[in-house]
Image (cartoon, rainbow, N blue to C red):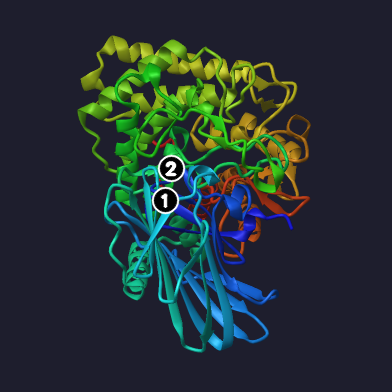
Amino acid sequence: MSKKIEDYAVIGDGQTIALVSRTGSIDWLCLPRFDSDACFAALLGDDRNGSWTMRPEAPRFETHRRYCGDTLVLETEFTTDTGKVLVTDFMPIRSGHDSCVIRIVMGLEGEVAMRSELCAQFDYGTVGPWYTEEEGTFVGKAGPDLIAIRADVPLTRDDQTIQAKFGLKTGERVAFSLQHDGSTHPAPVPINAERLLVNTKSWWLDWIGSFNKKTEWPGFVKRSLITLKALIYMPTGGIVAAGTTGLPEKPGGRMNWDYRYCWLRDSTFSLTALFNAGFDSEAKAWLHWLLRAIAGDPGRIRIAYRVDGGRHLDEWKANWLPGFDNSRPVLIGNAAARQRQLDVLGEIIDSTHLAERAGIERGDWGFEVERRLVLHIAETWREPDRGLWESRGRPKHFVYSKVMAWVGVDRFLKMQGVCAHCDEACLGRLESLRSEMHADICTQGYSEKRGSFMAYYGSHRVDGSLLLLPLVGFLPVEDRRMASTIAAVEAELMEGGFVRRKPAPLLGTEEGSFLACSAWLANCMVMQGRRDDARALLERIMGIANDVGLLSEEYHVRQRRLLGNMPQALSHLAFINAALCLDGPVLQRGGG
């Protein structure tokens, strides 16, 4: 039976995540961090590529799962003909260099025979560890990696599989742990699973407990915030776009990108959501990561970086993996990181401007970065680029890219203290440039015949990125050109109540609706005073989340399934921003 993306829940420790299937199998885990090689890659293949199964021996059983309140602790109930058990999966928040996955199994009713099978395969499902056993602990080493596997019941090894068979009666509990460290370190000491469970629940409850903003959907907003927190690499503050690679945007197709990196484009979306939700420390950490990553040369900016700020995301194919739902190739790394995407330059300055309005000090270094960026924009804004959707075809003059270049100049001129860093002549040139850019976009990017802004200069089609124009303050939402553009998007890109990023003739019917675009439309509706329409759209988005409240990148209306990498930060960020905007007041992009 084919897997479904919505069958997966996520657990994490602040530096990586694991994906747990509805039937209790951990099918994706990269160690020691998000962008490391996977040791469980069954998500993109089968059990031979690495997984950890925990399930009843019975061939038939029913499952029901949930998160334990507002935490990232996952609880899955298995019901068989003989009884019921609860599997609790979590990863303690990491305080050192070692990572740990803990699975606690408790009998709830009757008696249930259980089976655990752990097969670790490093290098994305190709390299099994060399195991040794000492006093019931299996220690495996593979290159730089070491894993230690322990349990409260006897473990046995069959080649690369560490397994256990055990029965549970009502009230009985059995704990399993997988600990990871470097292969030159000694094996990690045994853990106290029950104590770590209490500590992990408390950590998440304490973190989300500071959220007190008004919203009609506090449960879903909090789940989105928890998911966003799970995608933050805590040592640096970098936010990955998603926790996976290879999950297809088109089932059976080639759009299987690696999203386990930090995209600069997401910066203002992230800051807006974090500031408005009250998580200033995460916002500061992301801003500081951003400034460190781009360093001092705007001409060499990448559009995406590794979680530690590293620049090399070389793309290659893991041809031995059959792919999720036979979608190949499975891509590792992302060549789009080297693309010219002009919108990113404006995005960075917009981010620092937003941070300034939120009271975040960035110092002389931050201002110097902004000055260099705006001068680079002045030199390059007329050049074509690859655009928001990271086209791998011929560069074009994308309207959204031009608008974000204008945003960069506009926000720079609105910075406090700008006069102290630029002389009057420089400021005059930038003010003239801002007017010139705005006029050029309104002339070249707007079609009087269509009565709408277009995807790129000379195009005759709209796309979902145009919904961001009023959100970034390029034109008021009530401007006739903006109102007609929003109407055109609704008329031409809507499918089943959701927004596609491009018209169907360009992408085909296989690709789903882009969930962030749907949330952007809801944001526009709020700005237009269409609050009931916005509310209905946000409720539709919540309605297609999986059973534990997670969103991927896209939703296929006809097939009624999630598509793309999972969980997707931008989908949750866009929902948070729109939901909080509905109940405002909030910090908005484009303010003075």
Q: Quadrant of residue 541?
A: bottom right
- Identify the residue at image location x=54%, y=38%: 258
* Residue 314 position in % (x across, y down): 48, 28
Q: Which amino acid, mark 2?
A: Ser
Q: Are marks 2 and 1 in contact (CB under 8 Å)?
A: yes
Q: Nearer the viewer, mark 2 or mark 1?
A: 2
- Identify the residue at image location x=33%, y=52%: 181
Kindly identify which numbered label has been placed on residue 36: 2
Residue in front for this viewpoint, 124 or 428? 124
Q: Which image quadrant: the C terminus? A: top left
Q: Which amino acid, mark 1?
A: Thr
Specify whether residue 584 is in view. no
Residue in front for this viewpoint, 476 or 514? 514
| Tag 1 secondary structure | loop
Kindly identify which numbered label has been placed on residue 16: 1
* Residue 432 position in % (x across, y down): 42, 13
Q: Which image quadrant: the N terminus? A: bottom right
Residue in front for this viewpoint, 551 or 332? 332
Q: Which numbered disc, 2 or 1, marks the residue that appears first in the sequence?
A: 1
- In the rendered view, would you say 284 is above or below 264? below
Residue in front for this viewpoint, 130 or 305? 130
Disc 1 residue crowd, few under 14, some 14–19, many 20+, Cα 10 Å: many
Query: Label 2 to label 1, Cα distance in Å?
Result: 9 Å
Disc 2 residue crowd, few under 14, some 14–19, many 20+, Cα 10 Å: some
Kindly identify which numbered label has been placed on residue 414: none
